[in-house]
Image: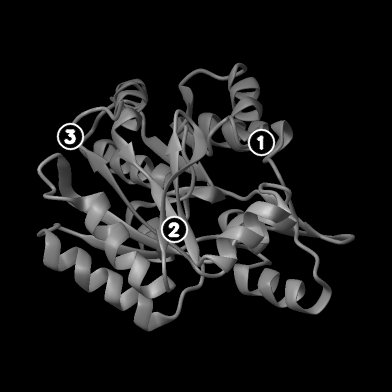
Amino acid sequence: MNKQVIIASDSTCDLSAELIERYQIKILSLGVSLGDKQYRDGVDINPDMIYENYEATGMLPKTAAVNIAEFDEFFAHETQAGNEVVLFTISSDMSSTFNNARLAAQEYEGVYPINTQNLSTGGGLLVVAAAEMAAEGKSAKEISEACNNLRECVDASFVIDNLEFLHKGGRCSAIAAFGANLLQLKPCVMVQNGKMVVGKKYRGKFRMTLKQYIADRIGDASDIDTSRIFVTHAGCDADIVDQCVEQVKAMEKFDEVCVTRAGCTVSAHCGRNTLGVLFIRKHPIC
């Protein structure tokens, strides 16, 4: 008899509560510190608390990887219950979470950590795909092998309205931030080979640049797996999100358009007005 396969992820997958419940996904939270206070991403802190604290103090939080002991406890509990585990983490280039999971997993049979080489719902796409494979009866090893190949097809990007958070977090210079804001430049940040790189720079108001960005990313959709697409944002106004969802639906008939709110990790790095469309292509992205 096949063992039950548990699908798990760190909290950076940014899946909605509805999707987590639907697919019975186990979430392990990254740590978030604000000053001398410690929190767990998505458990006792949310992005709005980060924004409110920043407005009051000018202080951004620091995030901490899930540690080896937490992974060890989780893997021990699941394997002792007779389960196998496939666990997804944020890109190893962005956090030590994957390495911690890998080290902990060495002590257990049937535990497969996967470096998504992505962040947010770029990883979330793989988590959901894995959960669907588990429901079909595939083994943890089969799911791991399939997802390690599928990650090469994930198209993840987002547009940032204001570079203030990136500048304050030390991820762009003051001159770059000033120039971008002065010229109303909105960079498209893409994930490539596990790293964030700047792609096309859009110019104009955030709402209008999102229209061009979505048109560019989806194109004629001929190379897109249309079973699912995510519209993920870090606290945009509802009417902006609705506009983007309607544009996505008008451009292509996706089986499911999932709207999710980015968690503390993405929000702390990019700021409130950040939005992306994330999906899987039919072929690996070069």
Measured Cα–Cα span from mark 3 to mark 2: 23 Å
The image shows residue 106 at horizontal and vertical percentages of 60, 16
Q: Nearer the viewer, mark 3 or mark 2?
A: 2
Say if 226 sits above or below 94 in the image: below
| SS label for mark 2 | strand
Measured Cα–Cα span from mark 2 to mark 1: 37 Å
* Residue, disc 3: 282
| SS label for mark 1 | helix
- 213 and 126: which one is in front? 213
Q: Earlier in the sequence, mark 2 or mark 1?
A: 1
- What's the colour scheme? one colour
| Mark 1: amino acid | Glu
The residue lying at 70 percent from left, 31 percent from top is 68
| Mark 3: amino acid | Lys
Say if 196 sits above or below 35 in the image: above
- 244 and 37: which one is in front? 244
- 92 and 195: which one is in front? 195
* Residue, disc 1: 73
Q: In this view, does 206 lie to the left or right of 76?
A: left
Q: Nearer the viewer, mark 2 or mark 1?
A: 2
Q: In this view, does 245 lie to the left or right of 165?
A: left
Q: In this view, does 51 lie to the left or right of 119?
A: right
Measured Cα–Cα span from mark 1 to mark 3: 37 Å
The residue lying at 71 percent from left, 36 percent from top is 67
Quadrant (top left/top right/bottom left/bottom right) for the N terminus: top left
* Residue, disc 2: 159
